Image: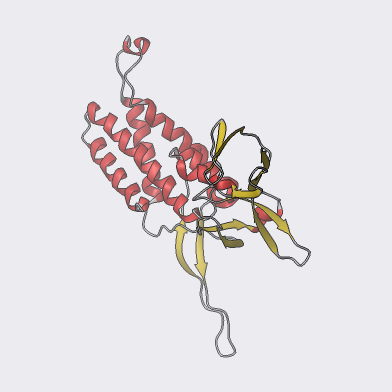
Amino acid sequence: MSDYWHLTRTHLEKGAALLASGDDDDLVYACLELRKSLEAYAYSLLQKYLSEVPLRAVETWQPDKVLKELLAIDPNSKASYKLRVKRNATENEENGAWKVLGEDRRLPIGYLRNSYHALGSFLHVPTIRQSARLADFAPARARALEIHNRISAILAPGRIIGNLGNLYHFNCCECETPVARRREFILSGGTVECGNCGQTYDVENEESGHIRFIPRSFSWIVRAAGHFRTSSRAKRKKVSTLLVRLAHCQQHCISKESDASNMMLL
């Protein structure tokens, strides 16, 4: 797995070197490197939440969409904070002094989205209307420098990436990937989706206080063969028709895909 923390800094330093040249042609490539730095920043956060994110978040690459997913999972994922610890008092010693372990610095989602798209706009060939005017690279350079400085502040010494919360953990029944969800999400009745294979689970709160994660599945009956078949939702084909091949009884059945969990094949 890529070290996105390292990539964030690597692309930032490449962008800084290109900006320092003062060449307008280098400015385009500087913007590209800064965009890559923002992408790596978003994925460095995502890595800390992999057991909590649905498959669609892992498959996407746009940093603003990644952070939207994280915000839905953890409302505090957009906020910066300092992590401090201290020793509790004992019979023989008083409380220890607070010690700062590091600062988890985050970019606001709105700022990241606007910066990402602004940098992208500098990469395109000017439109016909824009080309009629004298090219002015000063606004693009000023914006790129501002974004560079903002990312540099995020990466200053003492940065950590944390993920704090009250979590429920279990392993996916299909692929054994660890899955975690926050207590607030579970109590709200949300559906859980494995971030690796896409298997979905219904959540059941028992009177005892225990939580049950029930995998969704669909089933069908083959009357001619007298068999009952079931399969997990993760293995269901996302196509307009579902072809079920029953080799043991030489039957081919095609059924239109629907939202129903049960299908009967004659």
- Who is closer to the viewer here, 144 or 124? 124
Q: Residue furthest right?
A: 207
Which residue occupies 40% across, 60% down? 158
Q: Residue furthest bottom?
A: 92
Residue 12 at x, y percent in the picture: 31, 44
**Number of numbered discs overlaid on the protein picture:** 0
220 displayed left or right of 117? right
Residue 29 at x, y percent in the picture: 27, 32
Residue 66 at x, y percent in the picture: 49, 42
Q: Is residue 12 above or below residue 5?
A: above
Residue 183 at x, y percent in the picture: 65, 58
Q: Is residue 126 above or below residue 245?
A: above
- Who is closer to the viewer here, 211 or 227? 227
Residue 227 visible in the picture: yes
Query: Is the image coloured rainbow, by chain, by secondary structure, or in one colour?
Result: secondary structure
Q: Is residue 160 above or below residue 226?
A: below
203 displayed left or right of 167? right
Which residue occupies 68% across, 40% down? 264
**Which quadrant would residue 151 be assigned to in this image?**
top left
Residue 192 visible in the picture: no
Quarter placement of the C terminus: top right
- Who is closer to the viewer here, 242 or 176? 242
Which residue occupies 63% across, 46% down? 225
